[in-house]
Image: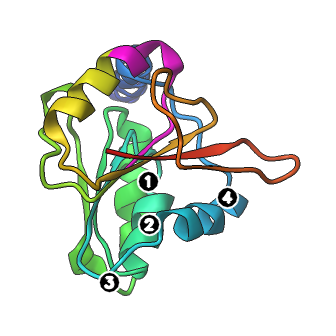
């Protein structure tokens, strides 16, 4: 019984920590994956990062589109779900999930960065991305815009959150 309690306590602590670092786990709607892929216009071999990848659905979709896709996650439950999802993918070699903090990860090799995080961290994240990303790198923000950047495109679909496409 104590072992089960400890397991759930660890899951809860990692969930709270992830929420404090960037966002609690709230999945991107399944129906918005196709919108993401269209907006991202992924080319084979491009490097894609999903910051706070949750259950990994976008990472897997990006890999199936040809990207070398990596998801970062700090909450154990969605991290395990992402690894489980990976088991059923055709292109496993292009899918990577890391139990990592986005603040300690270097994104200089990115061609595409996807984020669905709470907007209170955007000012600090904006500085990090401006410092690390190469010219031409795409950033897709789900739901909230990044203040101070002008989106190249805003994807609108009635009844769904907005997606903002930026480019460094």
Residue 161: horizontal and vertical position, in percent? 73, 41
Q: Nearer the viewer, residue 57 or 117?
A: 117
CB within 8 Å, label 3 to label 2: no
Residue 85 badge? 2
Q: Indicate which disc, 3 or 2, sits on the residue closer to the N terminus.
A: 2
Which residue is identified by label 3?
A: 91
Dot 4, how many residues are within 10 Å of its Cα: few (below 14), some (14-19), or many (20+)?
some
Disc 1 from disc 3: Cα separation: 17 Å
Q: Give the CA separation, mark 3 to mark 2.
A: 12 Å
Residue 122 in magenta?
Answer: yes
Give the CA separation, mark 3 to mark 4.
21 Å
Labels 3 and 4: the sequence-earlier one: 4
The Cα–Cα distance between marks 4 and 1, rounded to whole angstroms, is: 19 Å
Which residue is under mark 1?
81
Task: Answer few, some or many: residues within 10 Å of disc 1's Cα (few below 14, many 20 plus, some between 14 and 19).
Answer: some
Q: In this view of the protein, can residue 101 be seen by the observer? A: no
**First to last magenta residue range:** 113-123
The residue indicated by pointer 4 is: 32
Q: Is 53 placed above or below 86 here?
A: above
């Amino acid at each position: 019984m104590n072992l089960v309690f400890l397991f759930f306590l660890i899951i809860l602590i990692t969930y709270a920590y992830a929420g404090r670092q960037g966002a609690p786990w709230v999945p991107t709607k399944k129906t918005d994956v196709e919108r993401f892929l269209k907006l991202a216009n992924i080319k084979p071999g491009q490097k894609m990062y999903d910051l706070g990848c949750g259950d990994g659905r976008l990472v897997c979709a990006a890999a199936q589109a040809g990207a070398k896709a990596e998801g970062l996650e700090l909450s154990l439950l969605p991290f395990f779900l992402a690894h489980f999802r990976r088991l059923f993918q055709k292109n496993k070699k292009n899918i990577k999930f890391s139990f990592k903090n986005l603040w300690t990860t270097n994104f200089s090799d990115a061609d595409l960065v996807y984020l669905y995080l709470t907007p209170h961290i955007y000012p600090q994240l904006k500085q990090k991305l401006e410092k690390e990303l190469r010219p031409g790198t795409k950033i897709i923000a789900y739901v909230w815009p990044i203040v101070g950047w002008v989106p190249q495109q805003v994807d609108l679909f009635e009844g769904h959150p907005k997606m903002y496409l930026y480019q460094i």
